[in-house]
Amino acid sequence: MKKILPLLFFVLSLNVRAQQKPSNPHGLKVDGYASYMDSCKTNSDNKLLEIKKFVPGVVLDIRYATANNFMKCIMYRQARAFARKPVVMQLKKIQAELKKQGYGLKIFDAYRPYQVTLAFYEGAADKNFVANPAKGSKHNRGCAVDLTIIDRKTGREIAMPTPYDSFAPEAAADYALLPAEVLKNRKMLIDTMQKYGFRVIPNEWWHFDFKGWQRYDLLDIPFEKL
């Protein structure tokens, strides 16, 4: 019994410290898998849907599942893309509209686990191009998508101001000193996304936040559990 008591006190102290420790370095409320599942029971809009299963013909180029990204290393174990249910339903409408014009969507990134946002901020040379983990990212809420437009006949991306994840000034959504074709393509992308409830962010032509993102909690769930 004497040997058991110190062990019991040690375990209890670990539990107390674990409860006192915030779920992340910034003390934010970040939901894990169990909390996320509970939220889906009360509101089906909270569900993270796998985009390719609901958006016919969408193309994925999940750069963070490769080393072809600004971090130069693999950040995701699986090349998959998820977003909250209302986001995916709007992407489906966008894809249908683009298809009529011979175009389609290519998605680079969507839902992003919070731990990856922490790693991005620590590793990025230019903090203006990554979300501050003290606030969290719309990607962490499943309410942001990084994407471009492709020509359905060729499968190639149409001309845009910069490659994806460029830190160049030309990546800004309103950068004007560009060829007429590029300006036209960027406008088509932004106008189409805006029509369905998305807003481009100022410094990245490819990044779109979904209206009402404030209603959704930050998440830290790896793709393997979804």
Image (cartoon, rainbow, N blue to C red):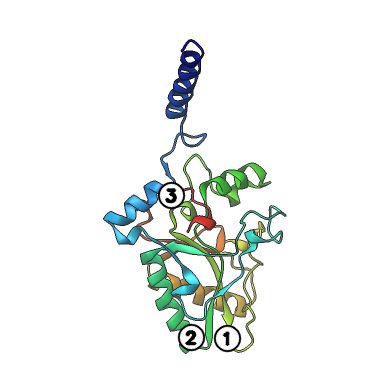
The alpha-carbon separation of the residues under discs 2 and 1 comes to 8 Å
Q: Residue 110, how many percent across, how many down?
A: 51, 61
Q: Is residue 217 visible?
A: no
194 or 13, which lies in front?
13
For the residue carrying disc 2, how many other residues have a C-alpha within 10 Å: few (<14), some (14-19), or many (20+)?
some
44 or 175, which lies in front?
44
89 or 150, which lies in front?
89
Which of the 4 quarters of the picture holds residue 93? Answer: bottom left
Q: Are marks 2 and 1 in contact (CB under 8 Å)?
A: yes
Q: Which residue is situated farthest in the top direction here?
A: 2
The residue tagged 3 is 33
Task: Name the N-terminal-most of marks 2 and 3.
Answer: 3
Q: Is residue 39 visible?
A: yes
Q: Residue 148, how many percent across, how many down?
A: 56, 72
- Looking at the picture, which amino acid does disc 2 mark? Lys
The residue tagged 1 is 152
